[in-house]
Amino acid sequence: MTYFQHLTPNDRVTYGNCQVSNIAIDIDKNSKDIKHYRMSVKAEDGEIEIRKFRPEEIRHLVDTEILVVERGYYNAARVRDRELYAGRELNGANAHQRERVDLLIQQCRLMERYHAMGMKLTRDGVTEFRASLIEDYETYQARKFYGTRKANAAQRLKKLPAVSTLLENYRKYRRANGNPNTFLPTVSEPIDLDLQASLDFCFVMERLGKYACATQVSKSKVIDDMIEDVRAENAARASLGQPLIKILSHRQYERWIELYLDPFDVMMQRKGLAAAVKKYGSFEPGRTASAIGQIVLFDAWRSHVKVLDCTRAEYNAMFR
């Protein structure tokens, strides 16, 4: 099998633009020479045909490009290239997924064929034709995987699914207009849990910041409004399958207001600049740091300072 040695699941063999799923050899018992290559060729209607070729015919078929062996056809890089042409190939599927989807498509083709012959798309209607469906399904597997025209007891064949599963898959197949990609699992974007926790915290603190308001709204009112916004956001995320924001107790949110909101800004917004200066000292624009750890010089014994990265305890200790 010089032409077909070392084939992998990422390789593809086609005969007349029809995919070859199995290649076997018939060897002469006396001379041990290869008499025929036996191939399972999938026709355009989805059926499997068994074709036999002599070794000298294989050379002619390869030279005329009727028989094509494509190494690495299903590699990720080549699959991405073919996606640009919007074909109906199984995008990003591995060998196991391609085999599973191929059997699902064959089940749907059998359902379509027998529906055209009068089978009703109901449980009773499919049950009436189930024996014929099983026979055709096993014949397809025997030709595809073993290169024999009929199934036998020595072959390990997959069973035909239940009637309800057949009907469900066939409806899905028709809604997708025969696109096999509909049977692949949906690929979700990976979620960075640390980043998501940071975004959730910012979402909450943005709303708790409304406590620094001239109307002197109470903490309880700010927290209640924030929880309503969180519940609305969680409802939207649940519909998209995204992680939800955890709702904590009122007391915990009160601690967050005290811990993370700038006390000078809160005092200034709620009671005015004079009250904030009286409690925390003078206020002036000063100089701005642009990087963590940058040294800023100023001439004042006591001043209000904002830094890029520090703990609450370190922040309060700066005024002592």
Image (cartoon, rainbow, N blue to C red):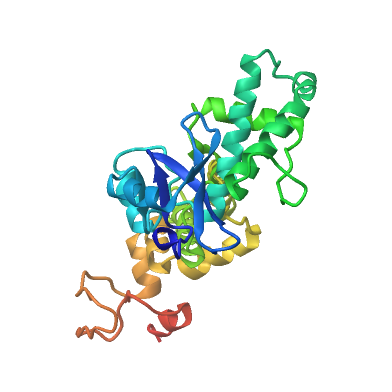
Q: Residue placed at 22% from the left, 74% from the top?
A: 290
Quadrant of image for the N terminus: bottom left
Q: Relative to residue 313, is residue 49 depicted above or below?
A: above
> Residue 117: which quarter of the image?
top right
Residue 76 left/right relative to 176: left
Question: Along the line of sight, which residue is nearer the eye, 106 or 265?
Answer: 106
Horizontal and vertical percent for residue 226? 54, 49
Quadrant of image for the C terminus: bottom left
> Residue 119: which quarter of the image?
top right
Tell which residue pokes out farthest to the front in this image.
30
Q: Relative to residue 146, is residue 307 depicted above or below?
A: below
Question: Along the line of sight, which residue is nearer the eye, 267 or 111?
Answer: 111
Residue 156 left/right relative to 43: right
Q: Is residue 235 visible?
A: no
Horizontal and vertical percent for residue 191? 49, 59
Tell which residue pokes out farthest to the top in this image.
118
Q: Residue placed at 77% from the left, 23% from the top?
A: 123
Horizontal and vertical percent for residue 229? 53, 45
Q: Relative to residue 212, is residue 53 depicted above or below?
A: above
Q: Is residue 118 visible?
A: yes
Q: Residue placed at 33% from the left, 62% from the top?
A: 273
Question: Along the line of sight, which residue is nearer the eye, 257 or 271?
Answer: 257
> Residue 31: which quarter of the image?
bottom right
Question: Along the line of sight, which residue is nearer the eye, 252 or 184?
Answer: 184
Horizontal and vertical percent for residue 266? 42, 61
Q: Residue placed at 57% from the left, 35% from the top?
A: 105
